[in-house]
Image (spheres, coloured by chain):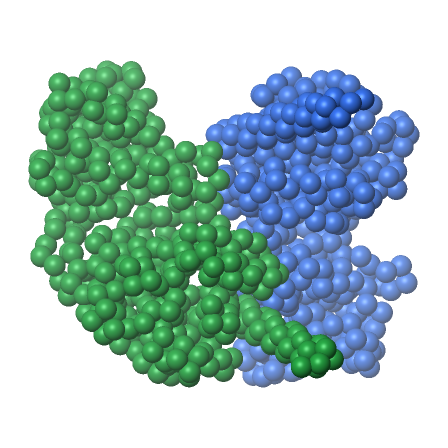
Chain colours: A blue, B green
Amino acid sequence: MSKICILLCLLIFTQIKASAQKIETETVTSLYREALTDRTAYDNLRQLCRNTSGRVTGSPQAARAVEFTFDLMKSMDLDSVYQQPVMVPRWERGKKEKAIIRSGKLGNTHLNIAALGLSVGTGKRGVSAQVVEVMNFNQLDSLGSEFIDGKIVFFNRPMDPVLFNTFASYGQAADQRMLGAASAAAYGAVGVIVRSLTTAQDDYPHTGVLRYAENSPKIPAVAVSTNSADLLSNRLKEDPGLVLQFRTSCQTFPDVVSANVIGEISGSVYPEEIITLGGHLDAWDLGEGAQDDGAGCIQAVEVLRLFKKLGIQPKRTVRAVMFMDEEIGQRGGKEYARQAEIRQEKHYFAIESDRGGLLPLEIGISTSPERFTKMAQLSPFFEPWGIYRIREGGGGSDITPLQKYGTPLASFIPDSQRYFDYHHSANDTFDKVNIRELQLGSAAMAALVYLIDQYDL
Amino acid sequence: MSKICILLCLLIFTQIKASAQKIETETVTSLYREALTDRTAYDNLRQLCRNTSGRVTGSPQAARAVEFTFDLMKSMDLDSVYQQPVMVPRWERGKKEKAIIRSGKLGNTHLNIAALGLSVGTGKRGVSAQVVEVMNFNQLDSLGSEFIDGKIVFFNRPMDPVLFNTFASYGQAADQRMLGAASAAAYGAVGVIVRSLTTAQDDYPHTGVLRYAENSPKIPAVAVSTNSADLLSNRLKEDPGLVLQFRTSCQTFPDVVSANVIGEISGSVYPEEIITLGGHLDAWDLGEGAQDDGAGCIQAVEVLRLFKKLGIQPKRTVRAVMFMDEEIGQRGGKEYARQAEIRQEKHYFAIESDRGGLLPLEIGISTSPERFTKMAQLSPFFEPWGIYRIREGGGGSDITPLQKYGTPLASFIPDSQRYFDYHHSANDTFDKVNIRELQLGSAAMAALVYLIDQYDL
């Protein structure tokens, strides 16, 4: 080939590349334009929040949420919409919990509490005992049975406010909620009260699941609001002999059948390759599950709507999945992966949105270094929309089970500063969702799915 | 000098530089740590909002805000705290405004309105006329006196939701509020009603200042909530002959004396060189002025507290300035620059925070290209705290008058997605401020001042 010919070929190739890039940039812009000028996702989220408030896994509200999202996607002219049955735990809070500090010296004071998910109830008479405050498990261990036996253990380590990433600080403090009851019971404690996992200073108790140990008794465990935790801690300094009484009537029932809800647009070239995108449909019973994780579900549905509306025909099958039971047993995510194996599905990519419908800031990706290097080159598409970092490390409870089949995983990572104001509390309501933040998130996920598919990444 | 000697010198220099860098990084971390674990700024903002709600320039509430911030800084053991007198406009809203659509065909309907700042009132009988809806000034001009004379002009162009930067979209739509009355009056209009400048779809009217023209009559002008604007627009489609009646009782009085409030820490090496940092103390009368711009003022005060608390002794004088009257006449900013000239003050740098106490995302700087290149090298200090862009172009109404003396100007640029939900409306209240976002902003500004001073930038 002559030099001129080579140069000509290079020139043509560069032009094709440049014009391809131009088409992709235009499509990304169109996705953002449509998302930012349409209220469908916001209205869908409002309906989900208002009509299925308190949709803890296995509840009638969760069943309504399955119906709602199923009907919603059925109305969207997708290629396939179905429910994937999953057996899920059934835990009920029962009556509103009560807690009171009794002190001869200081008088009586109420605390704001909520039972932790999967906790046993106290029975009608409640639990009543002196309180031992600890900041961590080392302190618990060094106190041992001598000081713990017969007491209520009060885990009071706050989330570290100095960490910029509040999920990191949540991760450092969540052991108290998750394992506090099991550890305290091993030393003979009769109950556990855990400082709410939140960066806010307020009156909302933030619930969440606990894990009992097989070899120690199941004792009742509750979350206490940060204001009440501080009050209890201060009272204990003044009267270490005070008695805390609390009553919960929560119960665990046999598993019930529920479902993952799935909608898809079939791929035009590689229909057998699946890009999965999702959030979890269940939510804690105290709130409306707006940020956690109604937003993630509705954004996944919105991605399909955006594709349909703009006439984008993906090469691969794009699937929106509303996973059931992320909060208690992660059964939906496990069942989804199990079914994928049974059906020999090829999962090309999976994206999870479970950090709220807040301002998109980053995309986290777990894949091979070579593939990551390619994906990081997508940055210029996202920077005009405020996403400056495509970083290594992504996933989420519901999609991680797919990793063993080699599926690359991505996390949609919005701003985390406000998230724990809402998380697992009665404060997680629709009015806390800003429409633009929700829209920008849907657009970012749609753009990511589109670019992965388009560039065969 | 031998080669070994040169190498040795280079090595020592590099080590000094590295260790200096280490000290600066540690100090920045300390600033963030202190800001993120202390509630003083948040509590100060609560007090400012609750005790001086409606502090429009020249009002008794604004006078209370001057006293409050003066007393606050007086209590902080600063080197100097003083008030700088400024003559400011005095405009009063008077009674709550009323607007009603009268239509024989469709019945009567109320609209949510608020007079624009500096608007004349309608008198007791109000303004009552048919309505001409326009989207822009070209349309107004092409309609001309023939269609405008005797009518109320309805400016209904929304802020463009597709722009990521909502300030850009505000900038594109604000001409309607600012110049709508002057332009419509020139064609004989009797009143003006302007769609609220907000990205939200709700019932809050968002006020803001207007400018009349010298050569056309001053006609009454009001803002209308976006929901009411859509309603009016829809009604007009069904009944173009409907009549809009609105009544306002706002008035402008003679100028009154007010003040900029200034607190400073004297420089230890170059006390005559001043780094000014500030926001504006006045706010629109409809809300508490929490995001606009109580946050900016309180963050400036917090920067001084952080310096004192950590024992940082700046080389240059650091000044927190609460500017008065940004919203109507920008008299505070002008007077501050005038006094700086009279006193031959050398303003080394000026930073304005007037975009809300929201998540810090960028720092914008207006200076020479060489100086900007140096400043952009500060990025690594800010990236761990979520600020990924130091970009060219900064300033703000209150500090721009300093530019003619060669002072480099910076804007503190937080996330803009939610800002216009609050801006100039009754929705701008303390509860809309997230403590962590406020704290991160104070820390970012403290770090910026510290680094500029430390590195002689």
Q: Quadrant of residue B97?
A: top left
Residue A152 placement, left or right of B236:
right
At 29% across and 21% down in the image, what residue appears? B235
At 68% across and 50% down in the image, what residue appears? A93
**Where is residue A317 shown, x and y percent of the image?**
75, 24
Quadrant for the C terminus of chain A in the image: top right
At 15% across and 65% down in the image, what residue appears? B257
**Where is residue A189 shown, x and y percent of the image?**
78, 71
Q: Nearer the viewer, residue B133 or A10?
A: A10
Residue B417 placement, left or right of A453:
left
Residue B240 placement, left or right of A48:
left
Placement of A77 over or under B374, stated as above or below: above
**Where is residue B317 shown, x and y percent of the image?**
38, 77
Q: Nearer the viewer, residue A14 or B219?
A: A14
Placement of B79 over or under A358, stated as above or below: below
Residue found farthest to the front: B1
Q: Is residue B152 visible from the viewing direction of this image?
A: yes
Counting the numbered discs, the total is 0
**Where is residue B82 shown, x and y percent of the image?**
26, 76
Q: Nearer the viewer, residue B357 or B457?
A: B457
Q: Nearer the viewer, residue B345 or B86?
A: B345
Quadrant for the N terminus of chain A in the image: top right
Q: Is residue B283 visible from the viewing direction of this image?
A: no
At 63% across and 33% down in the image, what residue appears? A447
Residue A359 placement, left or right of B337:
right
Q: Quadrant of residue A129?
A: bottom right
Q: Quadrant of residue A212?
A: bottom right
